[in-house]
Amino acid sequence: MRILIQRVKAASVRIEGETVAAIGAGLVLLVGVAKGDTPDMAAKLARKTANLRIFADDEGKLNLSVKDTGGEVLAVSQFTLYADTSRGNRPGFDPAAPPEMAKMLYEHFVQALIAEGLAVQTGVFQAYMLVHIENDGPVTLMLEDRA
């Protein structure tokens, strides 16, 4: 499982011209699920994400988590995080989990974030989405747990 984390001032998801999710300051999480990933991996990455200290304290040091700041979270499923570009110019997506498994683990990850006390909004699984991200810093990190 891979989570691309972006610290944001604001973010939103639009589908067919309608805003389906929007947050203020917090994190955008692009969530990729691979074949072999497990609910335990999802829970572990949710805990890590919730407690990752990537927000500045009063002295400007990255000492605060999204939980500490009361920030919001926007989680968006992103199978393209598992694109294989090792051959040719067209990415292959064989490493990505099949949709039914990916959806179950994505939803498990979201529920684990909520259990951590975070306010979470989501995109729509398998939908074509326009994601607006006002990256703050920019601060962008990749978390990964492998099967």
Image (cartoon, rainbow, N blue to C red):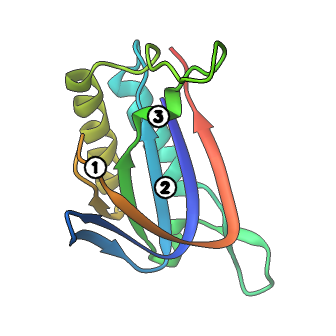
**What amino acid type is highlighted by mark number 2?**
Ala
SS assignment at label 1: loop
Coordinates of residue 27 in the picture (x, y in percent): 49, 64
Q: Nearer the viewer, residue 126 or 69?
A: 126
Q: Tell me the amino acid under the disc marked 3.
A: Thr
Q: Is residue 138 visible?
A: yes
Q: Secondary structure at mark 2?
A: helix
Question: Marks 1/2: CA distance?
Answer: 27 Å
**Is 26 placed above or below 115 here?**
below
Position in image of residue 106 (x %, y %):
31, 37
Disc 3 target residue? 80
Which three-letter amino acid code belongs to the residue tagged 1? Tyr
Residue 132 x, y percent position in the rendering: 44, 69
Q: Which residue is mark 2?
A: 50
Q: Is residue 115 left or right of residue 146?
A: left
Rendering coords of residue 59 (x, y %): 80, 84
Local secondary structure at mark 3: helix
Residue that appears at 40% across and 62% down: 131
User: Do residues under tags 1 and 2 come within 8 Å of each other at their CB atoms?
Assistant: no
